[in-house]
Image (tube, grey):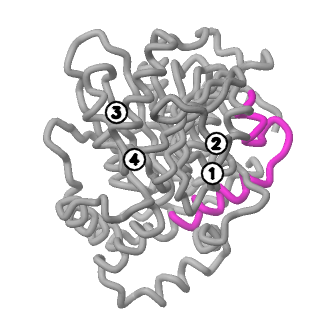
Amino acid sequence: MSSTDLPSVQAPQVLPKVAPVRVAEGERLRSVELPGITLTVRSRPAERAGVPRALFVHGLGGSSQNWSALMALLADVVDGEAVDLPGFGDSPPPDDGDYSITGHARAVIRYLDGAGHGPVHLFGNSLGGAVTTRVAAVRPDLVRTLTLVSPALPEIRVQRSAVPTGLLAVPGVAALFTRITRQWTPEQRVRGVLALCYGDPGRVTPEGFRDAVEEMERRIRLPYFWDAMARSARGIVNAYTLGGQQGLWRQAERVLAPTLLVYGGRDQLVGFRMAQRAARAYRDSRLLTLPEAGHVAMMEYPETVAMAFRDLLADTGGSGVGADGADATGETDDADGMTGVAGVADGVGVVGNAGGPEIDADGADGADESAKG
């Protein structure tokens, strides 16, 4: 058991009946059984044949629905699939109770290997950004490009607004929070989530709010919901403490795939100040800064994120890395890919990795930094 793994727990055998998961027009939902896990996969078939595949990975407490808007906007250039990580969305808990970054990354790798879909354009938000960074580092053969929206990478000075989420990692806090909030309505819970994750919650449409309330009502009926949240939060905290080759910043440096980084200036969970460090860490990176966005820019400003990804495709020709499985240090990983390593808006800014100036929306030199993951 690695230092990011958690003790095994038996997955619930009998689950209560809950409302079906919402599926947007043009999307499909299916269940995929893999060794030790069952994943729900949301797909939006491409509008034309011959386009590459893309896989989207959500953040802590999220689901594949977080990517519906962006997948719809990119349906002409990618064949999109979004996965519900184990214990989230409509995916049941993993058999071994492993919600670590390594465990989630292993689930993504098993899906890609099992489906034979690699290399893909890989997207990740927040927790999903840490997970996909690890996937890209240890299995470069599976990744054409990497797009990270507010990736959850280690910060020395965590924002005060992110502390309550981090406290979920402390044993007993999730149970305490459940008791304290027992009388909260789904509407109250959703408003709290939107206030934390959006730069401007007013951008959510009434229909979007209703859909979020419906999904919240469904989730809080699941007996493993808070356990998945707490253990995944603990997995993030544990990953933050790792050094050496397993450290997330070290793995970011090993990513070979062209990388698009998206950071929101109003992100309350991932510090906007981390954008420049991330741009330096990923060797072939492009940085998109959205001063008015929060933690989920792909939901708040999907058109802008889609445009930036199209630019990434144009710059790279949709190319990926070699298919020999070797990472940046020449190491080769095992079949799971996890054990071979020791251990829009005004003011949008884009910067390449060559040290050029950050350029804002009207072409003027932008600020180096301003103030979600």
At mark 1, the secondary structure is loop
Magenta stretch bounds: 229-253
Numbered badge on residue 370: 1
Q: State the residue at coordinates (25%, 35%).
A: 72
Camera-nearest label, 1 or 2: 2
Whole-percent x and y of residue 164?
Answer: 60, 74
Which residue is tagged 3?
Answer: 81
User: Does any portion of residue 333 appear in the rendered image?
Assistant: no
Dot 1 or dot 4, earlier in sequence: 4
Depth check, front residue: 39 or 27: 27
Alpha-carbon distance for marks 3 and 1?
Answer: 33 Å
Q: State the residue at coordinates (49%, 55%).
A: 295
| Amino acid type assigned to the residue bearing label 1 in the image | Ser
Residue 313 sits in which quadrant? Answer: top left
At mark 3, the secondary structure is strand
Residue 83 sits in which quadrant? Answer: top left
| Amino acid type assigned to the residue bearing label 4 in the image | Asp
Q: Is residue 91 magenta?
A: no
Q: State the residue at coordinates (31%, 19%).
A: 77
Dot 3 or dot 1, earlier in sequence: 3
Left or right of 140, for residue 283: right
